[in-house]
Amino acid sequence: FIFCFFFNDTATTEIYTLSLHDALPIYEEHNKVGCLYRKEEELPDWYNKYMALDPGYGVCAVGWYAVDPATHDVYKYREGRFENEAMSTIARKIKIMSVGEAIEFCVVDGSEPNAAVELNQHGIHTVLDRDFAANLQDYSEKGRKRAGIERTRDYLSGASGPRLYISEICEHTRREFQRYAYDKNGDPQKENDHHLDETRYMISSRPKADTTKILKRGS
């Protein structure tokens, strides 16, 4: 069974074809844009802003997000990728990249508390993704990852109400969606995942939506 993800672009149309067992499940909605928005589309200033960071191994991935407080839709509008740099250096750089933006918090991999401490020391309010997993039946790192992948799938499809939209300029994120894979045991492979991991941390930090209180898009 194949899921196709259509990226509509002014210049080209890319079709990502991924099997359920080879990648994060992607959503098809009759050739409509599932979760891509063009870089020229400006997001309102009153959207809430967040960051997510995956320290990784040699690669640190950072994502910037805006959340519509009415629909709870999440927009990934910027990404950063830092290779073989100290966390203190990365912290200084992302603060510069975030000038003028009221970032509410940065969510970080729960297995990397030292990264959170470093970011907090540089004035970046940081929380751990595991802080949002108290109600999970399986609180282990593997369990949190599985739950986060399921939650991200829901946001991509809109099945839970809110949706995840990714800016076309987030090339690393888009590329990793294409390459993300599972091993023969059905576990996610630990590669091609830095930006998808931080995306998962962000989605995992979102409160479970009360769909009765969510405004319909365009209302």
Image (tube, rainbow, N blue to C red):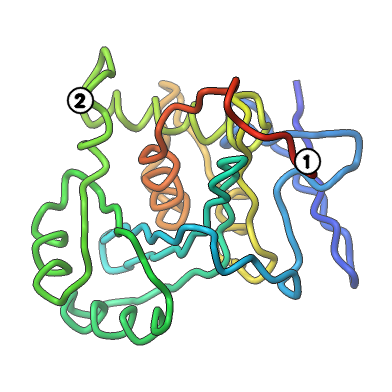
* Residue at point 17%, 74% (across, down): 123
- Point out residue 81 in the picture as x, y percentages from the top left corner: 42, 73
**Nearer to the camera, 114 or 19:** 114
Q: Mark 2 belongs to which amino acid? A: Ser
Picture quadrant where residue 186 is located: top left
Q: Is residue 17 left or right of residue 192?
A: right
Q: Mark 1: which secondary structure?
A: loop
Q: Quadrant of residue 136?
A: top left
Give the residue at mark 2.
140
* Nearer to the camera, 142 or 189: 142
> Callout 2: helix, strand or loop?
loop
Image quarter in which the N terminus is found = top right
213 over 205 or under it: above or below: above
Q: Compare marks 1 and 2 and give the one earlier in the sequence.
A: 2
At horizontal 40% and vertical 59% (from top left) the residue drawn is 50
The amino acid type found where label 1 is placed reads Ser
Of badges 1 and 2, the one in the foreground is 1
In the image, which disc is placed on residue 219?
1
Quadrant holding the C terminus: top right
In percent of width and height, residue 130 lies at: 22, 36
Compare residues 66 and 21 and report the one nearer the observer.
66
Give residue 184's position: percent from left, percent from top. 46, 24
How much space separates mark 1 and mark 2, taking CA atoms? 40 Å
Which percent across, then down, holds residue 96? 35, 87
Write the residue at 91% across / 34% down. 30
Tell me if mark 1 has few (under 14), some (14-19) or many (20+) residues whose alpha carbon lies within 10 angstroms of its own: few
* Dot 2 crowding, Cα within 10 Å, few <14, some 14–19, many 20+: few
